[in-house]
Image: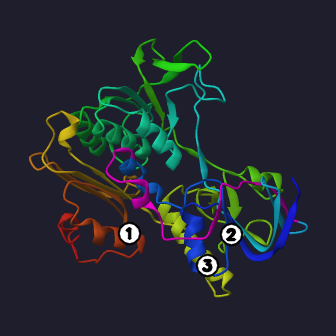
Amino acid sequence: MRTQTENAARVVVIGAGMAGARLAARVPGVTVIGEEAHAPYNRVLLAEVLAGRYEPDVIALPPTEVRRGVRVVRIDRADRLVHCDDGSVIGYERLVLATGSNPVLPPLRGLGHTLPDGVHPFRTLDDCLALRAAVRPGVRAVVIGGGLLGVSAARALAECGAQVVLAQQGEHLMERQLDSEAAGMLRRHLEALGVEVHTECRVRGLRCADGDAPAVRAVELADGYELEAEITVLACGVRPRTGLAQAAGLEVRKGVVVDDELRTSDPYIHAVGDCAEHDGTVYGLAGAALEQADVLAEVLAGRPARYGGTRALTRLTLRSPSAAGATVPAGNLDLAAFGDSRPMPGDDVIRLADATRGAYRTVVVRGDRLAGGVLFGDLAAVGTLARTWQDDDPLPADMSLLHLLTNDGGF
């Protein structure tokens, strides 16, 4: 294929995910290159698409001009060019890496570079649509990984009528966000939806049927027990996509290292979103990606702006659909978690549990500030608490800490 060199664009963005689309919406004349054939979409809502609640067009982001289905294969920093797999070469004045992350494929027996039939990652819209096409009522599905993504996938599969087993290696679900008591409530709710939950459960491998196209038949646990599976979902976390940056000689640790202006070790290249590492942290959260894109838009416009990190809130709603075929608690279960809910010596912990109403609230106070918290059930207080935590505001000296758990967050 003949190589075509295009005139230099002022800003070229590699990646059409939430961070890239947000930046394009705020910076005029941006050239966005995206590998996926789909228009940019809200990745946070993929579980709603899997559950059949939303169609893909519902989760589309505001229209953005994107060169879809094109993959960048090389960055030429010396001449400020990006080389694409369709033979085109695009010049840039500033380049932005918004390459996102890849799903972690665990080192399981029977899992090679080519996934067996019935084994699905759950990261992209194509992943979601392939999984939705494979699900039918009564199908046996095993979800490997009990973090936010695994819990969301298990809930959505249960809503589709699948017989779901959730296998979590850690002591409890969503270990990064929840304490053991909140995780226990989450587990009971999932079980009421018909999900069979196994914690402290290490998966050793997959048993697949032989043939030209191997298909998964069971998930093998470390203790020798097998979980029958027609569908297996890999929800074992994500890893920043840093291959382009590494090949170009940029500084990479866990992610592509950036400063407070989201600038990499090359002054003409920036990075935002899941691929970026700022001050030692790779956030992997939609809120951080959007915040970084907003800051970078100001930087590219020549206005003073600095990124100082993101204090992100995790929210999850678990519905109680009649399609689950089980007796479930009335209404939905709403969850919100922020900051560090694991107390350190000297911290104050305020906790309210109401088993009758299915409500649970706990906050950790460190000195005169909120360190973190978890709220289940009625989330009336979450807005005020989250804003106080996000702004790192001191708590009023004359306020009773018990008032933090009232519906107005004590303010």
Residue 354 in view (yes/no) = yes
Q: Is residue 51 magenta?
A: yes
The image shows residue 363 at horizontal and vertical percentages of 29, 59
- The amino acid type, in three-letter code, at marker 2 is Asp
Q: Is residue 348 magenta?
A: no
The residue lying at 36 percent from left, 36 percent from top is 172
Tell me the element at label 3: helix
Mark number for residue 389?
Answer: 1
Tell me the element at label 2: loop
Between tags 1 and 2, which lies in front? Answer: 2
Between tags 2 and 3, which lies in front? Answer: 3
Report how far apart the C-alphas of labels 1 and 3 lie in the structure: 25 Å
- The amino acid type, in three-letter code, at marker 3 is Ala
Report how far apart the C-alphas of labels 1 and 2 lie in the structure: 24 Å
Colour logic = rainbow
Q: How many marks?
A: 3
Q: What's drawn in magenta, residue-wise? A: 50-77
Q: Which residue is mark 2?
A: 259
Q: Earlier in the sequence, mark 1 or mark 2?
A: 2
Report how far apart the C-alphas of labels 2 and 3 lie in the structure: 15 Å
Q: Nearer the viewer, residue 63 or 77?
A: 63
